Each structure stands twice: as structure tokens, then as C-alpha cells.
Image: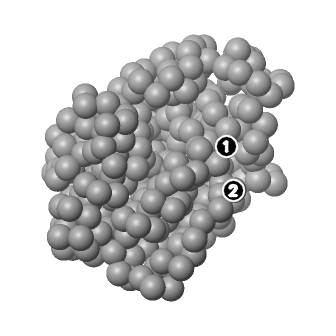
């Protein structure tokens, strides 16, 4: 099979198209012939040598795919050869074939092409587990997501609005802000021109946001505390501007704030399977009704994975970037 090799760490140019033997499914796994693979920020971090795969995972980049089941290991009884699935992988998605734990696979929602289905798993698993499980977002609450035009952001906006929250988002241009609002954000804030703390507090009669999903870090950590409502929940899933900061923790006590966060890749197969089940029950019907749709900005053939990484690092995209095979 073809796959994208990572012989050394560095810039996008280190990604190389190589050939090797296709894997075989172990107990509880399926083998997927990949039609499309999503590109995600963790792939960039892995390429730079800062996010190593967990023990036993494939060193090939790629955390989500869509395709067809071509072999089924013992104990993966739900799936059959020929099934169309999308899957959260533990690695190995940038390849013609990948093995995946059966519980991390989901049926491709009716009406979605493989490119769209490949844009679902990583962002939807991440948003569901952090916004709804950890953040406990409820209908009627105020939700703020930073990086609203990213794959995570466009997913979070749609899910939160469909489940009845008031949604605010930050983005880096007026064009990106309009895209966020078209997906369900009540108000998108151009962080280059406005202070999100002031905007959110003014729009909520100084109450603030009940749940904040942040992937920026840096000075946003203290500003999130100012923007949070009483009993607010702040969830960090990345620290693009740095994880080490000096902040006044007094608002945590005065507002009874919860500061939390998580990573998805190291979690157990059982935990990921539970998230998959929740998505299939509560979100997949909304996708099939057309109320939620993955936002695919650009596609690249597998040999052009480096160009896909360059686009992601440029920040010019709105939504997802997908490799096609």
C-alpha cells in the first residue's frame, strides 16, 4: 500500500510518499480501505516531533478516515466486508489501508460522500467529549468557542446551536466571522478588532459564557476567566499560544469556575467507543437530516500531504482539509 512516511521531524517537506505492506486486523479491529483521510492540527504537531503516537499505535500520521471495510478481525462482529464507515483512528490514516478498533468506527451518514465523512470523526469526537461531556453544555446556556473557523470550531458551532445554546465564536477576519455566523453563531468576534470579553459580556447583560472551548491558551487563559459566567466551565484542548502563563486564580473561587481539558488520542478504546455510541445516537440523525454538515474547505490527493499541511499552518482555511485516495 501507499502511505505517508515521517522519516524525520520538521516542516511539511519531511512528509514522503512511501510503499509498504498493508496491515492486518487484530482481535477487535477492522481493516479499512481508505477513500479519504482528514488532516488535523495534531498531525502537524506529530510531524514536528511534539506529539508522539501512543504505545502500539501506527507511526503513520492521520487520525480519521472514511472508506470501506475489507477485512474483519475476531470480535468485531458488528462490521462486515463492504460496509461504508468513517473512523477515529489511533494513527495510520494517511494510507491506502488502516486498521481501527471496531468501536471507533461509525456508519457513513446517509447522503454524505467519503470526503465529507472523513471530516467527521476527529472533530466530532473531540467536540462531543469536551463540550457536552466535560463542559456539560445545556440548552439555553451561552457557549463561546475560540478558533471558530477551524474544523473544531465549525463543528462546535453547529452542534452547540443545534442543541439549543447561544453560540459566540472568535475568528481572525470579518470573512471568517461571517462564515461562523452562517453556521449558527449568534455573534462572531474578529479578535483582531474586538475584545471577546467585552463583546460576550455585553451581549449577555454582563453574565458571560457558561462554557468556553479554547485551543489558543496564552493570554486567553486569563481572559477566559473574565468572560466566564458564574459556575462557568472552561475547557482547553490545545495551547497554540503557550501553556505556561501567570494568572490570577481568584476568579476561579469567586465565580466557582471549573478549568478542565483533555486529549483524545491517548484515551482507551472503551472510552472512544462510548463517545462513538453517543454520536451515533444523538448527532448522526441530525447529520442525516441535513441540520449539521461537515465543512470541507479543500482536498488534496495523498501524495500532496505536504501541501495540505502548509494550508493548515497558513490558517487560511475555514473548516476541514481532507486527503483523497
Q: Nearer the viewer, residue 31 or 14?
A: 14
Q: Is 287 or 236 nearer to us in this picture? A: 236
Position of residue 256 measured from the top left corner of the image (x, y, whole percent): 45, 85
Q: Quadrant of residue 115?
A: top left
Task: Choose mark 1 or mark 2, whichever is in front.
Answer: 2
Q: Mark 1 near mark 2, Cβ–Cβ under 8 Å?
A: no
Q: Which mark is residue 244?
A: 2
Rendering quarter of residue 177: top left
Q: Residues within 10 Å of mark 1 (few under 14, many from 20)?
A: many
Q: CA distance from mark 1 to mark 2?
A: 28 Å
| Residue 16 horizontal side relative to residue 85, left or right | right
**Does residue 7 appear left or right of residue 117 in this picture?**
right
Residue at position x 75%, y 18% in the image: 14
Give the class, few, some or many, for how many residues have Cα within 10 Å of label 2's Cα (few <14, many ≥20).
Answer: few
- Classify the position of the N terminus by image quarter: top right
Residue 314 picture location, percent across and down: 50, 23
Q: Taking the image as drawn, is residue 217 in sight?
A: yes
* Secondary-structure class at tag 2: loop
> Looking at the image, which residue is at 54% across and 38% down?
40
Q: Which mark is residue 91?
A: 1
Q: Note whether 120 is above or below 143 in the view shown.
A: above
Amino acid at each position: 500500500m501507499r502511505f505517508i512516511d515521517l522519516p524525520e521531524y520538521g516542516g511539511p517537506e519531511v512528509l514522503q510518499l512511501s510503499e509498504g505492506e498493508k496491515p492486518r486486523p487484530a482481535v477487535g479491529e477492522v481493516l479499512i480501505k481508505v477513500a479519504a483521510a482528514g488532516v488535523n492540527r495534531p498531525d502537524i504537531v506529530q510531524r514536528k516531533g511534539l506529539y508522539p503516537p501512543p504505545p502500539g499505535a501506527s507511526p503513520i500520521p492521520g487520525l480519521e478516515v472514511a472508506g470501506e471495510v475489507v477485512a474483519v478481525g475476531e470480535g468485531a462482529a458488528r462490521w462486515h466486508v463492504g460496509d461504508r464507515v468513517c473512523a477515529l483512528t489511533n494513527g495510520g490514516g494517511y494510507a491506502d489501508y488502516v486498521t481501527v478498533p471496531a468501536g471507533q468506527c461509525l456508519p457513513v451518514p446517509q447522503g454524505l460522500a467519503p470526503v465529507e465523512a472523513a471530516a467527521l470523526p476527529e472533530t466530532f469526537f473531540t467536540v462531543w467529549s469536551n463540550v457536552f461531556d466535560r463542559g456539560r453544555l445545556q440548552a439555553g446556556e451561552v457557549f463561546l468557542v475560540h478558533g471558530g473557523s477551524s474544523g473544531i470550531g465549525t463543528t462546535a458551532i453547529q452542534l452547540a446551536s443545534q442543541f439549543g445554546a447561544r453560540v459566540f465564536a472568535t475568528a481572525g477576519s470579518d470573512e471568517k466571522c461571517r462564515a461562523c455566523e452562517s453556521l449558527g453563531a449568534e455573534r462572531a468576534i474578529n479578535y483582531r478588532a474586538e475584545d471577546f470579553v467585552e463583546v460576550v459580556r455585553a451581549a449577555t447583560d454582563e453574565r458571560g459564557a457558561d462554557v468556553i472551548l479554547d485551543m489558543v491558551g496564552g493570554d486567553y487563559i486569563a481572559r477566559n476567566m473574565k468572560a466566564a459566567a458564574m459556575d462557568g466551565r472552561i475547557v482547553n484542548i490545545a495551547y497554540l499560544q503557550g501553556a505556561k502563563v501567570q494568572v490570577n486564580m481568584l476568579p476561579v473561587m469567586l465565580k466557582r469556575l471549573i478549568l478542565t481539558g483533555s486529549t483524545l488520542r491517548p484515551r482507551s478504546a472503551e472510552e472512544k467507543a462510548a463517545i462513538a455510541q453517543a454520536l451515533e445516537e444523538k448527532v448522526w440523525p441530525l447529520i442525516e437530516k441535513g441540520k449539521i454538515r461537515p465543512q470541507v474547505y479543500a482536498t488534496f490527493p495523498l501524495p500532496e500531504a505536504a501541501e495540505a499541511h502548509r494550508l493548515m499552518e497558513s490558517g487560511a482555511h475555514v473548516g476541514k482539509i481532507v486527503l483523497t485516495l
